[in-house]
Amino acid sequence: MLDTVVILRRELKSYFLSPIAYVFGMLMLGVLLFFASTSLQNNGPASMQQFFALLPLILVIFVPGLTMRLWAEEQKLGTIQLLMTFPVRTIHLVLGKFLAAVIFLAFVLLLTIGLPLTIGAYGKLDWPPVLGAYLATVMFAGSFVAVGMFWSSTTSDQIIALLLSLVSLALLYALGYPVLIDLMTGSGWVPAWFVDLVNGISPFKYFVSISRGVIDSRDIIYFTCFCGFFLYANALVLNNRRHTG
Amino acid sequence: MIEVQQLEKNYGFARALKGISFSVSKGEVIGFLGPNGAGKSTTMKVLTGYLLPSGGGATVSGLDVVSHSLKVRRNIGYLPETTPLYGEMRVDDYLRFVAEIRGVGFTKRKAAIARAVELCGLARVTGKNIDELSKGYRQRVGLAQAIVHEPPVLILDEPTSGLDPNQIVEVRKLIRRLGEEHTVVLSTHYLQEVEKSCSRVIIINQGEIVADGTHDSLVSERPAGALRARVRGPEEQVTARCTEALPGCRVEVVARHDGAIDYVLEAGTDAAPVAEAFSRMVVQNGWDLLELVREKATLEDVFRALTQEAQREALHA
């Protein structure tokens, strides 16, 4: 497990050493705060609801931009040869990279804390749901990172990784979207088990559940399984390359 | 130290290694020689655990490279062909990262990094970003990375490619120093490199080992096809008779000095009958044979002969 920490530290350091991280962080922060500021304009109740409602969609766009390079770049530069010949289990490499990306995203999210603080200063803000929503967002972002990283491991071309991640995340997002689910149930010809299955797979549903401020162990288990599945698949893809070269 | 048994590697339908076997004992510096695509890098990638073999096997320090991959990797320092480095990192940070992940303990880490920096002559650039370094320094950082955990076995894939002549000399010097403490396997295109830094040569061609031995043994096994002769006599006649007496042999005048003529006689494969015929011819004509030496084969001759022979055979087959 120590290996994971070493990889994590190197990854995190390189986020903050490269301009990509700053450009990425600033852009994401800018977009987040721009949309969220609309919630300050109307004279409604002090709440972060609008901000958190927007977050998943913003993550669909930004997470692939962050994860596309994670393995593709290593493969292009050949540093993958270094990583894969270190005396480290592949899954530990994967975990290290994953955690570093999640921590980086969490850091960017943390920078938005000024928003609830401001709202709280002008009105009565209910904090537990806000903190729950932050936690939900980090887990939700984590599940997206796991998917994006998986695609990145399948190619040495960052653009391909980006497109594959964008499409699959958009799909995952849409599958949990209440309107779509209602539409499917309402249409009558889609079998109920299929609607449940589709709705059950999408992390969006669990995000909505946690972001209400109620942390259910089922939601935690779901996110752990979802990430675990894609991280394991990621390690399999990398190990399989030892056969094909 | 390293045992390779009938090692095979296929990339799809392409057979990169067709069952090669060799062994390397402790303290040897082995030079892998071969044309591009011969299978040098593939062999190294299997030894370092980057690739899995398709058949056969290999052990490093008695440990199987497949079943004990992690332990084997701990015993190896590897410089891949592309010298992969993280450009955004500082040299010292990079070496610290490799030392940590390679399991160099906290207490020994500082000394280990200092040793690698000293051996590779990196003291002046430790605080610089790797991106800012010249190709020569980058190569040295790659070498430092490979030795920082003091592995018993070093595997260096073309350690001098892309360097200028001065840098090449330096890196070779470094490899010779490393050879005192480590078992080294290196691959190269430069034939002199093998002569200068390796105790043994393995020539590999189209996935097969075509020669394995010390430099001297390889060179002496191979009869050189060329003779150098100095004859005193009328040049035109000598040359004419020479071509008559030695059919199929290329005769060339390379120098003339006070009545003596220097010839190079290229006979193809075996020079011995040519030497006999030539000396008889000179004596019969009453000229003076001042010198007749068999030219020593160079490693280059051996390499060309072995790798091109195989190509010709492949064409005929």
Image: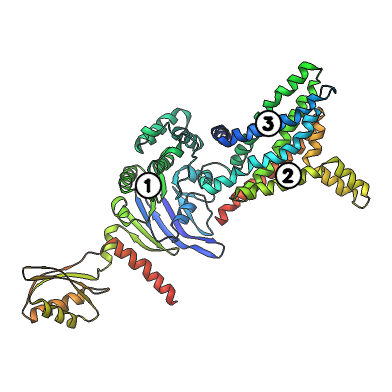
The amino acid at mark 2 is: Leu
Q: Quadrant of residue B129?
A: top left
Please, is residue B270 above or below residue B130 in the view?
below
Q: For mark 1, give the secondary structure.
A: strand
Query: Neighbour class for label 1 at 10 Å: few (<14), some, many (≥20)?
Result: many
Depth check: give the residue in front, B10 or A63.
Answer: A63
The span from disc 1 to disc 2 (Cα, nearest Å) is: 49 Å
Report which residue position mark 1 lands on: B183
Residue B42 at x, y percent in the picture:
47, 56
The amino acid at mark 3 is: Gly
Residue B169 at x, y percent in the picture:
30, 46
Residue B119 seen:
yes
Which chain contains the residue that carries disc 1? B
The amino acid at mark 1 is: Thr
The span from disc 3 to disc 2 (Cα, nearest Å) is: 22 Å
Report which residue position mark 2 lands on: A169
Q: For mark 2, give the secondary structure.
A: helix
